[in-house]
Amino acid sequence: MFRRDLPGAERHSGGVYIRMDRRGRVAPGRDGSFLESVATWPDGVQPLGFWHDLPVAVLVEAEEQDWPSARQWLGELGESHFMLLSTALQVVTWQRDHRFCGRCASPTRRIAGEFAMHCDRCGQRSYPRISPCIITLVAHGEDLLLARSPRFPPGRYSTLAGFIEPGEAAEDAVRREVYEEVGLSVGRVAYFRSQSWPFPHSLMLGFFAEAASRRIRIDGVEIADAAWFTPRRLPQLPPAYSISRALIEAHLQGVRTG
C-alpha cells in the first residue's frame, strides 16, 4: 500500500526505489515487481512516500533502456501498484518540464518537504500539473456506446473522454464532449468515481450518461468509429486497470442484477 508522506520519506536515505529511463520505461526489480531495495539511495532520487511502511523513491536514468513500459507494468501488477507508479510517473514528468521558470525562464530548484519547484529570481513556484478530464459511459437501456480512437490498438473500443475546459463544470463537459464526438444529446448524468491517469498527468472523472437517442454521428477526427453494443456481444475492451473498464464492468453488473 502506498502512503503519501513526502517529508517523512525525505528523512530516510534508503529503502525501495523505482528506476525509469527518460521515455518512462520502468526497470524490473529483483522480486518480480518494479521496486528495487537498497540500503542507500543513489544520487538524484526523488522520494515519494512509503510503500508498505518502507521509504520509496524514483530515479530517472539518463540512458534509454529496453525495459517494459509503464502500461505493461500496470497490466501485469494490477490496481495495488497503480497509485505508486502513477505518482512516480507524474512527478518525473513534472520535474522534467519545470526545470525552468515559466514566468522568467530562470532555473528552478526543488523545495524540501513538498512537490514544488521554486524560482529564486521572481518567486514563482510550480506544482505538478493535473489536467481534469471527464470519461463517460453512454448507455441506452442495456446497450453501451463504445468508440475507437485512431490511436487505439486494432479492435479495441472504449468509453468517451475529453478535457474539461476553463470555466466549465464536469457535467457540462460530459454533455459537450458526447455531442462533439458522436453527435448525441444526453439526459441524466451521474458521477461514478475518479482515477489518476499518468499519461501524462490527467485526473479522470468518471460518469454515466443516458442517451436521448441512438443516432450516432462521429466527428471523424478524435473518433474513428463508434457503435452500440449489447452486454452479450462486446468488442475488445480497455485494460482492467483503467477507469474506462471499471465503468463498463459496473454497467454490466447493473444489467446482470437488474
Image (spheres, rainbow, N blue to C red):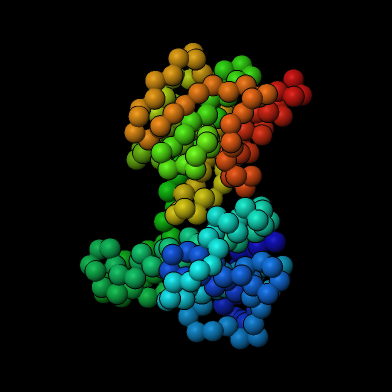
Q: How many marks?
A: 0
Nearest the viewer among 204 and 126 is 204
Q: Is residue 104 left or right of residue 57?
A: left
Q: Position of residue 133 (x, y in %)?
A: 45, 41
Q: Is residue 80 above or below residue 164?
A: below
Residue 98 visible from this viewpoint: yes
Nearest the viewer among 41 and 49 is 41
Q: Position of residue 24 (x, y in %)?
A: 47, 64
The residue drawn where x is 49% and y is 13% is: 213
The residue drawn where x is 42% and y is 48% is: 131
Nearest the viewer among 124 and 129 is 129
The quarter holding residue 234 reads top right
Q: Is residue 234 left or right of residue 161?
A: right
Q: Is residue 62 above or below residue 195?
A: below
The residue drawn where x is 64% and y is 44% is: 240
Q: Position of residue 205 (x, y in %)?
A: 52, 40
The residue drawn where x is 37% and y is 35% is: 222
The quarter holding residue 210 reads top right
Q: Position of residue 35 (x, y in %)?
A: 64, 71
Nearest the viewer among 180 and 153 is 153
The quarter holding residue 27 reads bottom right
Q: Is residue 103 above or below residue 212?
A: below
> Residue reaching furthest right?
257
> Residue reaching furthest left?
104
Q: Is residue 189 left or right of residue 218?
A: right
Q: Quadrant of the C terminus?
A: top right
Q: Quadrant of the N terminus?
A: bottom right
Residue 115 visible from this viewpoint: no
